[in-house]
Amino acid sequence: MTDTADRLYQLLPAVHRIRDAEQGYPLRELLSVIAEQVAAMEENLEQLYDDQFIETCAAWAAPYIGDLIGYRSLHGVAPHVASPRADVANTIRYRRRKGTASMLEQLARDVTGWPARAVEFFQLLGWTQYMNHLRATAHYAPDLRDWEKLQWRDTAFDTLAHTIDVRRISSGGARHNIHNIGLYLWRVRAFPLTRSPAVIDPAIGGGLRFRFNPLGTDMALYNTPETEEEITHLAEPRNIPLPLTRRRLKAHLDDDYGIDKSLCLELAGNPPQLIPRGAIHICDLSDIKDGGGNVIAWAHQPAAGSGLVSIDPELGRIAFADAPGATVLASFHYGFTIAIGGGEYERGAPAVPVTPVQTVQGGAALQAALDAVQNGGTVEVIDSFRYVETPSITVNAGKTVVLRAVNGARPLLTANGDIDLNLGAESTLILDGWVISGGTLILPASADSQPRHLTLRDCTLVPGPRNKGDGSPPLADDPGLVVAHAFATVELERCISAPVHIAADAEISLNECIIDATAQDRVAYRGPGADALAAGGALRMESCTVIGKVHTQQLTLASDCIFAAALIAGGDAWKAPLWAERRQRGCVRFSYVPPASRTPRRFHCQPQGDALEPRPHFTSLRYGDGGYCQLRQSTSEKIRRGAHDESEMGVLHGLYQPQREGNLRVRLEEYLRFGLEAGVIYGS
């Protein structure tokens, strides 16, 4: 019996229970049926009580509670306001603090999901002081010896006095006026990389010069944003993901250096040994060049025997005074806009776990573990180390092999040549969470006609030159993936990749991906082999950004995409920057297509027949920059709001940035103080 049925049965007089027992408990069976309905009624009554409160109500009831207090609904597509529960719960609190700078800042942060800071520009105007109410901190002329205030000039943290600008802030150029409020938003996020081996500079330094970036290139380091603890607190630089500058890091080194802080250096061991704060020296480690332009040293290298370790956060460089004596482990943050490619962000558990599982860590060889799972299994890497080898991956017929990084890890595979993918008939290979540089993934052709399945999820095939197995010189548009098997199916999800070469009869699907040939007049997609004009297999794309030319047999679908491609100036053997052989089949919808492209039928694409129509403008097209493949604000609204759901075209479509900005403007109309005008300003 259930608890409810037992409780009802105990309420019966003892004589009825005795008689019921003598007759085989028919009454108890009847009460069991009644108890089911009683339990359903009790549950419904409890839920009706919970539905009176926004914290506990059912999802369907939240809009009705909001309607009782005059809540205006927002675009539900933005992830942070998909459910109005939190926004409805905060409505009364917002109204009590209506018009204050701290409230507007919190509103912007809650509605958009981005770090924000509210600036009252009228507080920064320079005017004649009133002698009965002096503003001691409002100096009309800046102190040229105060480097920190000068560093923040014309940013969200500017405290210098400015002359008035009478233009409206909504025009985008004006800021400092009596009735202007600025809401700064930061779209670039700080992603962590934990205990990744620093890379020795091979050219100079004798083993004393390192880089934070595991790829061995310069990169800007970011700080770890700290959560604001008080509701009345206005955001400071430590609360915002910002690139670390030399002066700022030196002044606040105690806040930014150490375990679980913005950056940290350790020497490998069990456990790792932290390089003490007292040994860290912040300085400029820029290149010193000779008369011929060759780099001969880094500036401001620490003197031998001093025990110092110099760090340049703007270039991501490390210089030791003495040999470290162990592997240098660097923990730091880098900037990017969206969680795609290899990274330590949450990727979720694998859809179908494949056993047995081989665990690899510490940069150990992968080949032995891969050989052990040829008949099916998973090779799992549990750290963010560099794995320097060129493995060969074999999957036997009909089996599935997974090579993945666990959540919270971002391993790098540095290959010295091509990585062969030897897949048997009807086999599947899944790569998950890896960054691969130096080599090309190659799935060769086979004599049989059985399918092969290759899936890459949250991986980065670093764009740029690659080492080839045949010894030919690396080129800027070397492919990251080559599939020569005609019956293969390839799937890329949330990946960043160098150019892709796919056999003409194969099929490939891309979702939220970047394909980067490093220049718009280089080849991003085509068929394999030496023929530079060979057409690639049938292509299906959603929410992707392609940098470079595309030649495909069939463009099955391109939706919400940007093709940043152009023919070589002065003459090109290609017929079009985006070139589909079969134009009777397929569809291109809500995408940017370069002029003179040969595509199947188009639906709501840009530009619409005129070469002078809008084109995308990017913050950066260099892999590794914080604004990589991010559209500038100067890009036309036809592209920034040109997707099927009025979000932006390209790989950042899923961030719903126009909807976030629209939601904020809707809220500002309700909570902005009378007589003031607000402008949205992007800090990154």
Image (cartoon, rainbow, N blue to C red):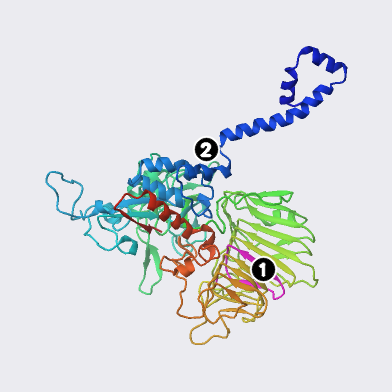
Left or right? Give the position of 468 relative to 172.
Answer: right
Of residues 206 and 444, the one drawn nearer to the viewer in this rendering: 444
Of residues 258 and 433, the one drawn nearer to the viewer in this rendering: 433
Q: Where is residue 502 in the image (x, y as percent from the top left)?
A: 67, 72
Q: What residue is rendered at 40% in x and 66% in y?
A: 296
Residue 499 magenta:
yes
Left or right? Give the position of 158 relative to 264.
Answer: left
Give the magenta range: 497-516
Residue found farthest to the left: 131
In space, the residues marked 1 and 2 are separated at their CA atoms by: 45 Å
Residue 127 magenta:
no
Disc marking residue 508: 1
Q: What element carries label 2?
A: loop
The earlier-in-sequence mark between 1 and 2 is 2
Q: Where is residue 203 in the image (x, y as percent from the top left)?
A: 46, 65
Q: How crowded is mark 2: few (under 14 residues within 10 Å), some or many (20 or more)?
A: few
Q: Where is residue 485 in the image (x, y as percent from the top left)?
A: 73, 71
Q: Mark 2 points at which residue?
A: 55
Left or right? Give the position of 43 relative to 452.
Answer: left
Where, quadrant-wise, is the C terminus in this rendering?
bottom left
Where, quadrant-wise, is the N terminus in this rendering?
top right
| Residue 295 sits above or below residue 70 on the image | below
